[in-house]
Amino acid sequence: MSAIEPPLPVTALSSFHAPVPVRGGKRVQIYVLRLAGAAAVAAFLSFCILWVQWQMASPGVSKISGDFVSFWTAGKLTLEGAAGDAYLKGPHFVLQAELTGDPMGWGYLAFFYPPFFLFLCAAFALVGYFPALCLWLASTFAGYAAMLRGLLPRDVPERNSVWALFLGYPAVMVNAGFGQNGFLSTALLGGAAIWLDRRPALAGICFGCLSYKPQLGIIVPLALAAAGRWRCFAVAGLTVLVLAGVATIAFGAEIWPAFLTNMGVARQSWMEPENPLYHQFWITVFGAVRLHGGSLALAYGAQTAVTLIAACLLAGVLLLRRPGAQSGRAQGAAIAACVPFCSPFMLEYDLMVLAVPMAWLIGEGLRGGFRRGEIVALCAAYFAPIMFKVTLFDDAIKVGVIVAVAALFAAVLRRMMEPAPLALRQATYQAA
């Protein structure tokens, strides 16, 4: 590099990797990755066929992807000018009963989202339930798939195989089976990671929009502050204020007391009672303690301790800012890997967010070689949604999923703390 050329910014250098010769061990990795990618695509396509068959075989509204009933009916109430009724069990349940025709078999699917999420629900409620469900899953999955393409730099070997691998990530099937919003959450987290360096304002908008599910964004302000991403921090905060302001104008100020009251009901009726049938879907330390008979105080205490430890570890690594290890993609991956430890209320379809740190870590490993234990951590996290379904040993496997997620988080942080590669240090020296 000529001395008269302008120096490269650290964020640009952070994605620089010297060419790695293809050795025997690397060839094996590539062949295994290609085979795994093909198997993942086959599993994904098979699930799509089965999903259509399940929907067609149901005489009415299928319970497969049935959580979307809550979103669609909330959107329908919004279109009818009764947005506040989405937070009231009476009118919301009546509309759900009319849609499903089986109120006793379905029970009540509550709506716990901030008022501005009602805009999106209303958009899908403009069409019938089943077309809306198909559009919901297809559009949010397209955002997830596009995010993966952008998250994997073009110089990653076997980039298409990695992308294919995550089409068949088991959490994809879990999220589609619930009809939930895991694709949307992952697309927003991944989009923020992609744009954090080049377009911090767009990254901030992604983080701000993640507030539609506030429990996923608890760690974001601290992480952005520790990383010194102040422009992104400001735009994220402004995005939340704009969304809240628009919702207030559209629905009236009284929508917020209804939402907050519903949050209190959610805590009293869903989080705190001993309800193993519901806690079996939780991926958090809080849920694991409650599932295994622990007291409420123990559950809150354990969750608080884990949250504080995870937040301190993430903030500490982000504050180090080692050259070559603090790109926006790396920081976004670390934030996404930390998310499962920062809220007591997360369910199994929220494991979708692990696609962001896994994709980043696989990309780094393919470019510069995998470190000891990374492949094990990646495999454990990738198959965590399947492990979570296993009920052997008194549901102890569900605790194993938390361990798998912790191993992935640790692997991401360790990778970020590594010194820059030799080629990167030489490029930095020549640019100075």
Image: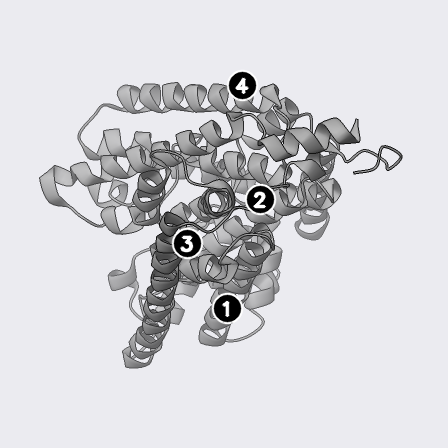
Q: Are marks 4 and 1 in contact (CB under 8 Å)?
A: no
Q: Are marks 1 and 3 in contact (CB under 8 Å)?
A: no
The amino acid marked with disc number 3 is: Gly
Q: Earlier in the sequence, mark 4 or mark 1?
A: 1
The amino acid marked with disc number 1 is: Ala
Farthest residue to the left: give it.
393
Q: Residue 283, how many percent across, how many down?
A: 32, 39
Q: Residue at x 26, y 44 (%)?
A: 278
Residue beneath disc 2: 210
Foreground disc of the pair 2, 4: 4
Q: Earlier in the sequence, mark 1 or mark 3?
A: 3
Q: Are marks 2 and 4 in contact (CB under 8 Å)?
A: no
Q: Is residue 277 above or below residue 311?
A: below
| Residue 254 makes an appearance in the image | no
Residue beneath disc 4: 316
Q: Residue at x 28, y 39 (%)?
A: 401
* Spatial CA span between label 2 and label 1: 19 Å
Q: Are marks 4 and 3 in contact (CB under 8 Å)?
A: no
Q: Residue 387, how many percent across, how many down?
A: 24, 47
Residue beneath disc 1: 138
Q: Earlier in the sequence, mark 2 or mark 4?
A: 2
- Mark 4: few/some/many CA within 10 Å (<14, 14-19, 20+): some
Residue beneath disc 3: 90
Q: Residue 215, how many percent across, how many down?
A: 48, 37
The amino acid marked with disc number 2 is: Leu
* Spatial CA span between label 4 and label 1: 38 Å
